[in-house]
Image: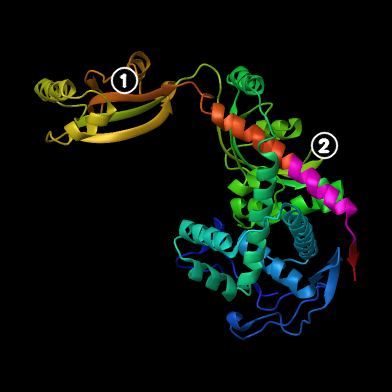
Amino acid sequence: MRWLGRIAGAGGAVLGMAIVACPAGAQDAGGAAAAPQQAAPQQQQQPQGLSESVVVTVNDDIISSYDIIQRMRLLIVTSGIQITDQNLPELQREALRSLEDERLELQELRRESKEQKFDLIASDDEVNDEINDIARSNNTNADGLLNQLASQGVQPETFKAQLRAEISWRGWIRGRYGSRVKVSEDQIKAYQDRIAAESGKPQYQVSEVVVDDARVGSAQQALTGAAQLIDQLQKGAPFAAVARQFSSSPTAANGGDVGWVTHGQMPPEVDAALEQMRPGQLSQPIATKDSVYIVLLRDKRAGGASTLVSLRQAAIALPATATDDQVAAAKAKLEALRARVNGCDTLQVQAGKIEGVIYGDLGEAEVKDLAPAFQQAAEQLKVGEVSEPLRTDAGMHLIAVCNKRQPGQDLANHDEIENRLVGQQLAMIAKRYLRDLRNSATIETR
């Protein structure tokens, strides 16, 4: 099967995902490969030779073979994965599952709309606003975004239908249950205490894809699906794009970004894997109680009593062989500068007024990793203070301490913890709600 290269130019990503070319010859509902077509993709109103046959009915709502092909194309284009004989059946199952879920969600919203005499389905304006937001985040406009999808054989209505279902269901769950979900101060305090207790341990910056056993049918299918996704990620599919389309976790909306975590915040099986991983490494499938995880370890830092400092400097280049007079002149110039500086905000401005003085932002680092000449000053100075001139083999320096903190303090603040706990509860409610809808539904495969 022919696979085309990535689209270049403005807007080459959708939802933060790389747009890749869909095979010109799509697969039919049974998985048979169609012959490659030479016609321009925008002329494909539906796959060549494919009739509008009914594949599944969901409480009398039909899902056609064309619907499945379109959703498969959307999954492929927005996740950046490549079609193989191995992953094609899973792509088809994922396309069908997502369409079934959306039919059930929209049916429930229509029923509730009648009862409440208020339309709960997202309007065209809301969908278009979402498309505009996505387009802006990808440096294009709505027309450009839709045209790019169309060039890959994805019709605009396919994309809009997915967005409409997502917006509507998210709004309904939050609107109906958001005020009922309560996170107590005790829960937040317990979470903060756990973070503090774990702050001495290594911390991990993690992204995740979670494949839910129940959603895909079984634990074995979840393992198989996760293995196929890992294969695609290793071939270059963007992690965030895959997470948005295939992850069952609430973090899918953020491209799988979990943020910084410590031991105990992830399932035990994931914690054990993280301990053995290196930054930049992608895990193998990690089976947990009811899901399979794929984790990307983006960064790792040691815990303990280390201190992180953010520094800026003003320096005068001076070789190690400089004379005593040169050293004294540089020192005097920096002492005069120091008298005019009252913190990080004014250092750059004042340094720019003195000839021969170079300003630089040194970023954040652990104190123990700093150059010896800087370590003592960084430890002793308070935030906002500026050092006396410091001599190194490279020159004479003033350093300003812009921030100082212990690792772990930025893992999550009060509001972030509250939002995270509320989001977890709402995600569980939505999951149970959809499960109940599916259990009571009549889903027939033709």
Q: Is residue 140 magenta?
A: no
Q: Nearer the viewer, mark 2 or mark 1?
A: 2
Would residue 327 be seen by someone viewing this image from the given angle? yes
Q: Position of residue 247 (x, y in %)?
A: 70, 49
Q: Say if 192 sits above or below 441 in the image.
A: above
- Looking at the picture, tell me which residue is in the foreground, 277 or 102: 102
Q: Is residue 435 magenta?
A: yes
Q: Residue furthest top?
A: 380
> Residue 110, how many percent across, how many down?
74, 59
Q: Which residue in the structure is indicated by mark 2?
A: 289
Q: Quarter of the image holding residue 196?
A: top right
Residue name at image x 27 percent, y 30 percent: 345
- Split into 4 quadrants, where in the image is the N terminus? bottom right
Q: Position of residue 379 (x, y in %)?
A: 37, 15
Region in magenta: 429-442
Task: Judge from the rendering whether residue 23 lies leftward or rightward of residue 51; answer left or right.
Answer: left
Q: Is residue 126 above or below residue 254?
A: below
Q: Residues within 10 Å of mark 1 (few under 14, many from 20)?
A: few
Q: What kind of element bears circle 2?
A: loop
- Please, what is the three-letter code of the amino acid marked with disc 2? Lys
Residue marked by disc 1: 373
Q: Quadrant of the C terminus?
A: bottom right
Label 2 CA crowd tier, 10 Å (few <14, some 14–19, many 20+): few
- Mark 1: amino acid: Ala
Q: Which residue is depicted at the point 59% across and 46% down?
A: 254
